[in-house]
Image (cartoon, rainbow, N blue to C red):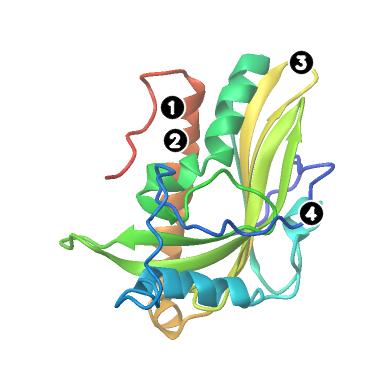
Amino acid sequence: MSDSPGHEVPRTVSSVPSPDPPVPSDRTGAATAAPAAGSAGSAGSALERRLLAARAAGPNYREVGATADVRLPEGYKHLRRRVHLGHGPEVLERAGRFVLGWGCQLGTGFAVFPFAPAEPGATVLLRLRLPGSHRPRLVIPCRVVWTVDEPDRIGFAYGTLPGHPERGEEAFVVSMDAAGEVWFEVVAFARLAAWYARLGRPVAVLCQYLAIERYLASVVDAAAGPGSGTPLPD
């Protein structure tokens, strides 16, 4: 996918990492119970162990935070997609809170663990349920690398961690221009990392394209107001 110049990127971002929450929660924000000391579950669930490992890891790419720059780094596939949402601060606020609450990912079929609004430094596992399965099989570790929350723009970016099928970053920003028109933009740079993604490159590229289309559609729905949003996954 080629880079399309001329779109906005965040002017200022918050980059001071926040500590990860000590108690994991699901996408609804309900805290999971901590196991009693010495019990059979004291080592935590497999998912919690994956989360701890992800928190201890560094990003698997060097250009951390580069989605906030006008020029994206070389050596990656670039993507910029923008869609019009409506007019006025109310649309900006509604769509921005949806984005910060991982609405794009939830509306695309991912579960987010632990669930909380995006904050710099937060580590999450995106879980995707594969067709024909009742349990998530693909677990994708990510870290929020910056957020922006200003009167005319709201959004965040996350970067990939070891275990992610790609290397790179994605940013999701809702902005309002001088005329009061509100836009949602996805900016990304990435290259395939996992062997299975490289072997199935055409499928991986198609899946990324479909995910971006779902991101855009979910925010359009959310900006339109209550009752018109994309249903969240179970």
Whether residue 108 is situated above or below residue 88 in the rendered picture: below
| Mark 2 or mark 4: whose residue is earlier in sequence | 4
Mark 2 vs mark 1, CA separation in Å: 6 Å
Does the residue at mark 4 contact the one at mark 3 (Cβ under 8 Å)?
no
Mark 2 vs mark 4, CA separation in Å: 28 Å
Is label 3 or label 1 in front? 1
- Mark 1 residue type: Asp
Residue wearing tag 1: 221
Q: Which residue is drawn at the image coordinates 41% and 73% (left, top)?
A: 37
Q: Is residue 12 left or right of residue 228?
A: right
Disc number placed over residue 15 in the picture, else none = 4
Residue 166 visible to an observer of this rendering: no
Mark 4 vs mark 1, CA separation in Å: 29 Å
Disc number placed over residue 179 in the picture, else none = 3
Q: From this viewpoint, which residue is outermost toward the left? A: 132
Residue wearing tag 2: 217
Q: Quadrant of the C terminus?
A: top left
Mark 2 Cα within 10 Å, few/some/many (few <14, many 20+)? some
SS for dot 1: helix
